Image (spheres, rainbow, N blue to C red):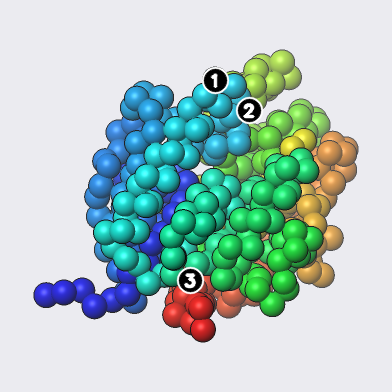
Amino acid sequence: MTNEKPVLLVLASTYPRWIGDSEPAFVHELNRRLAENFNIHVISPHAPGSKTFESFDAVNIHRFRYALQSFETLVQNGGILANLKKAKWKWLILPFFFLGMLIKTAKLLSHLKPQYIHVHWIIPQGLVMAFLSIFLKLPPMLLTSHGGDLFSLRGHIFIKLKAWVLSKFSLITVVSELMKEEAIKLGVPADKIQVIPMGVDFHHKFYPDFSMQRDVNEILFVGRLVEKKGVDLLIRVLPLVLEKMPCMSLTIAGYGPELNRLKSLTADLNIETKVNFMGAVTQDDLPYLYRRCGIFIAPFVEAKSGDQEGFPVSIVEAVACEAPLLTSRLPVLVDAFGILSSHLTCEVKDLNEFCDKIISRMKIQSDVAAARSLRDNFIDKLDWEVVANRYKSLLKNLGN
């Protein structure tokens, strides 16, 4: 029987390499919810251990080859920009990455003849589609920017390039109001941009478990170990916290190019026994960490390249599990928490203020009502069903 659902072609660099992968899965989480209404085919990069084609959760995944398998490490464990920064030799395989994506996309466009295209990230995916639009008649295209692609690459040539790419799309979605302002600076008309953060499963995965008792001495961080996550500041503040609360410890769940530097930093500060580097953690294991911790801290900063978070999913996951929370004062986070921002954010680069805020937040972490109120506020906007329904509507009306 022929599948009569319209074909949606999706391009993304960060995507699960297999079922249960520890790589961020937000693009797949959206796709599997859209699969009820669309026949979805995803183009993403191949990686060691992954298949060139597979289908799971009713989503078809086509992975393009771009190097010998052992060298196909440009994306995972930190993202493309972070990997290029850490290993300069990877710039040599970047042209083959673009070429592999270009060839795979052209073939699937010809074979599948999609009715809609959804592209995640301006560069490289948006650039590939913008280039193909010069030579091919393409269906309506939606581009979603997640933060790093919009905020980083600030040189004059890159600014012009991003503006050109964005001009080729019918509609742009971004994950925060701050990003919308940034896109407008690139010449995108305001009425062509919609703000839709990525979602979190508040009902079936990330929810509080009141049978668990929190470890009041545990600080938790979850995320990729890259510069913009600010994990070095969290490690640097820990000795100050330990002076006042010697039982505290830090759990770091994540992997990335900063790992060895961060481990060296803990050794230099003589706090190795107080820091647990868990490595990459699967999505299924994350809720337990959020429910167990005494406080979840997201010390995000703006990287030297200008890269910063668009709207961090890990914060929403922590809120969904009603974990006590503290973040930095990045504008996107201040905007997200509104009048609560003074209670939940601090200047993490001021280690004394950072320390005092951690201690004060730990003392009031029993404020269950406040945590529940924050969760209720987020669920109406950020539950996956709400987010997916907005995208379903956008895609169906794309080009009208």
Q: Nearer the viewer, residue 60 or 256?
A: 60
- Using the rendered image of the protein, determine whether residue 389 is visible from the camera's viewpoint: no
Task: List x then y, in percent, for residue 376.
Answer: 61, 75
Disc 3 to disc 1: CB gap under 8 Å: no
Q: Which residue is mark 1?
A: 89
Tag on residue 140? 3
Q: Which residue is mark 2?
A: 85
In the image, residue 139 sits, relative to residue 156, either above or below, namely below
3 or 1: mark nearer the eye: 3
Give the residue at x 47% y 46%.
Answer: 13
Disc 3 to disc 2: CB gap under 8 Å: no
Label 3 to label 2: alpha-carbon separation: 34 Å
Residue 7 left/right relative to 54: right
Question: Considering the image in quadrants, where does the N terminus appear?
Answer: bottom left
In the image, residue 185 sits, relative to residue 327, either above or below, namely below
Q: Nearer the viewer, residue 99 or 227?
A: 99
Which residue, as the protein is rendered here, is positioned at the far left? 1
Q: For the residue carrying disc 2, how many other residues have a C-alpha within 10 Å: few (<14), some (14-19), or many (20+)? A: few
Please identify the quarter of the rendering in which residue 305 is found.
top right
Dot 3 amino acid type: Pro
Which residue, as the protein is rendered here, is positioned at the far front? 135
Task: List x then y, in percent, for residue 362.
Answer: 73, 50
Label 2 to label 1: alpha-carbon separation: 10 Å
Give the residue at x 66% y 71%.
Answer: 193
